[in-house]
Image (cartoon, helix red, strand yellow):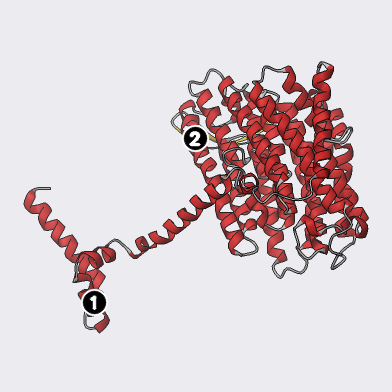
């Protein structure tokens, strides 16, 4: 995949493979595949991370009795993401999009607990909103007579409406505000699943669709305003909630939420290449961060509280180094991979006509990112007062994938920048604005190191300002409603006669006696004959 990526970057060509399925009148239904520098390079990143995660999962899930089934479902998850990446038509897109939804639900409920069941159901229901919007957009494609992304243009009568619908569907898949609550809940899945979901699959699917649309058609001003608002608010919510969280997996999940907001903010400024660049760098170091956290969970027998991980830095120096590298990338430490993308997005924010509210929210989010990252590093890597480790898991299956991803986290930014000159963005800023980002980061680091505990009144902050209990309550109420509607499976005759009179009870007693045919057959025949006589007499 790396060789193919270099070839497409050097040639700058696009290959479209299209297969006509059938045609109705003048509308051709086709199955198209796109091979260009975007799809091939993203496929390279997905396969690299997936291979590392599969090596790690071989050790992580070795004691599970159904580890083979887990690997097959995980493989179908990766295949669905690759189908979405190379999709050129709405049919191919739906194949990968729905495949991601089904396999992610199966992976989230893998542990078969009540928490994982509710988390999987919540993820499925929120993602169903995006699926419904994409299916509805097929009518707009049908009105144009084509089903490919290349057919979207300014000349289309419903072009702006179609792009708006696809962008809203992408926001649900990428967990943007107000659809953000399912991303921390998806932590009920095993850690290898989280490493894939939060780095290069599922949550990046929506952003990739918007990037693909941006290359075909520049986004409208109203759509850009929506993306700026959703991206900045999501970035702020993720950073604020992570500051008051003690679960290490939820902290990393909320950091993913924050970085996804940065990508959507870049798309709102009409910089799709810069957003794709940050998507690549974030995927590399976020997978490394999850694998390091998974190795820590292996030696602590599943304890996810950062307040009991003080001995990790002494007992596991290699894992501690990997955790520190990925955390520094998250902050945007100079000359790490994310430094080339994240800082450029923040500097472009000062150079473009972005409203002051979004700029202030992004500055707050940058400060909070440095704060919760330094707080987590202090508790996990630098503190020596925690509980001693209970076990020791090490070997090639744990260190080899982390070593591969660490090279990408350190050198990936400069390497990807050298592949495509289109990712290079020039910026000219005053010294005050240029240094403001660094000052806010340093202040956040110092305040994170000074933070000793979590306030008791931080429930509203750790739950995304009550967004999580709101969605959780609605999903729970919907599940209760569905369980009550199981009476419909009994048919419409039984509840009717059970409520309206004793005829159903008499028929059931006759049926139980064995001397009469089934009461439901008698009653349904009686109703049909009665309605037929009424229709004949009154001329209906």
- The residue positioned 78% from the left and 55% from the top of the image is 306
Q: Which mark is residue 393?
A: none
**Crowding near the residue tagged with mark 2, few <14, some 14–19, many ≥20 C-alpha atoms within 10 Å:** some
Question: Relative to the observer, which residue lies in front, 429 or 45?
Answer: 429
Q: Residue furthest left?
A: 537
Specify which label sits upstream in the sequence, 1 or 2.
Answer: 2
Question: Relative to the observer, which residue lies in front, 193 or 539?
Answer: 193
Tell me if residue 535 comes above or below residue 27 in the rendering. below
- The residue positioned 60% from the left and 39% from the top of the image is 93
**Crowding near the residue tagged with mark 1, few <14, some 14–19, many ≥20 C-alpha atoms within 10 Å:** some
Residue 224 in the figure: left or right of residue 49: left
Across and down, in percent, residue 268 comes to 65, 26
Across and down, in percent, residue 374 comes to 82, 43
User: SS of the residue at dot 1?
Assistant: loop
Across and down, in percent, residue 279 comes to 74, 36
Across and down, in percent, residue 236 comes to 67, 36
Q: Which mark is residue 138?
A: 2
Q: Which residue is mark 1?
A: 517
Q: Is residue 417 visible?
A: yes
- The residue positioned 75% from the left and 57% from the top of the image is 305
How many angstroms separate mark 1 from mark 2 (CA)?
49 Å
Question: Relative to the observer, which residue lies in front, 486 or 143?
Answer: 486
Tell me if residue 384 comes above or below residue 261 in the rendering. below
């Amino acid at each position: 995949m790396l060789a193919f990526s270099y070839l497409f970057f050097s040639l700058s060509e696009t290959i479209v493979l299209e297969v006509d399925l059938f045609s109705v009148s003048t509308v051709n239904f086709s199955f198209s595949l796109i091979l260009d520098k975007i799809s091939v390079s993203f496929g390279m990143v997905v396969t690299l991370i997936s291979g590392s995660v599969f090596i790690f999962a071989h050790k992580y899930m070795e004691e599970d009795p159904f580890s083979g089934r887990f690997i097959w479902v995980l493989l179908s998850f990766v295949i669905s993401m690759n189908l979405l990446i190379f999709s050129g038509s709405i049919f191919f897109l739906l194949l990968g999009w729905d495949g991601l939804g089904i396999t992610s639900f199966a992976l989230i409920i893998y542990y078969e607990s009540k928490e994982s069941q509710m988390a999987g159901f919540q993820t499925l229901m929120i993602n169903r909103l995006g699926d419904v919007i994409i299916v509805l957009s097929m009518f707009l494609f049908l009105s144009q007579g084509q089903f490919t992304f290349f057919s979207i243009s300014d000349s289309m009568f419903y072009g702006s409406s179609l792009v708006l619908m696809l962008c809203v569907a992408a926001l649900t898949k990428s967990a943007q505000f107000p659809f953000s609550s399912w991303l921390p809940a998806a932590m009920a899945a095993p850690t290898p699943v989280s490493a894939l979901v939060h780095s290069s699959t599922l949550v990046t699917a929506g952003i990739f669709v918007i990037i693909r649309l941006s290359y075909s058609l520049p986004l409208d001003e109203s759509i850009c305003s929506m993306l700026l608002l959703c991206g900045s608010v999501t970035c702020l919510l993720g950073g604020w909630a992570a500051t008051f969280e003690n679960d290490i997996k939820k902290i990393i999940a909320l950091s993913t939420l924050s970085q996804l907001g940065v990508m959507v903010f870049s798309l709102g400024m009409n910089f799709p290449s810069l957003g794709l660049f940050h998507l690549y760098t974030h995927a590399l170091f976020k997978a490394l961060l999850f694998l390091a956290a998974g190795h820590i969970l292996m030696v602590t027998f599943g304890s996810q509280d950062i307040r009991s991980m003080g001995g990790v830095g002494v007992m596991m120096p290699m894992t501690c180094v990997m955790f520190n590298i990925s955390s520094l990338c998250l902050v945007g430490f100079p000359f790490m991979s994310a430094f080339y993308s994240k800082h450029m997005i923040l500097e472009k924010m000062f150079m473009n006509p972005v409203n002051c509210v979004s700029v202030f929210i992004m500055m707050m989010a940058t400060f909070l990112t440095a704060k919760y990252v330094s707080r987590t590093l202090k508790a996990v890597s630098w503190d020596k007062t925690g509980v001693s480790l209970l076990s020791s898991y090490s070997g090639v299956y744990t260190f080899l994938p982390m070593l591969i991803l660490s090279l990408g986290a350190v050198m990936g930014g400069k390497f990807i920048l050298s592949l495509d000159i289109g990712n290079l963005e020039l910026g000219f800023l005053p010294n005050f604005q240029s240094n403001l980002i660094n000052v806010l980061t340093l202040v956040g680091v110092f305040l994170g190191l000074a933070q000793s505990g979590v306030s008791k009144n931080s429930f509203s902050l750790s739950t995304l300002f009550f967004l999580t209990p709101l969605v959780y309550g609605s999903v729970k109420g919907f599940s209760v409603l569905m369980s009550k509607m199981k009476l419909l499976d009994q048919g419409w005759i039984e509840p009717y006669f059970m409520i309206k009179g004793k005829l159903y009870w008499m028929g059931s007693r006759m049926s139980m006696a064995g001397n009469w045919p089934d009461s439901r057959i008698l009653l349904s025949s009686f109703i049909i004959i009665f309605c037929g006589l009424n229709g004949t007499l009154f001329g209906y």
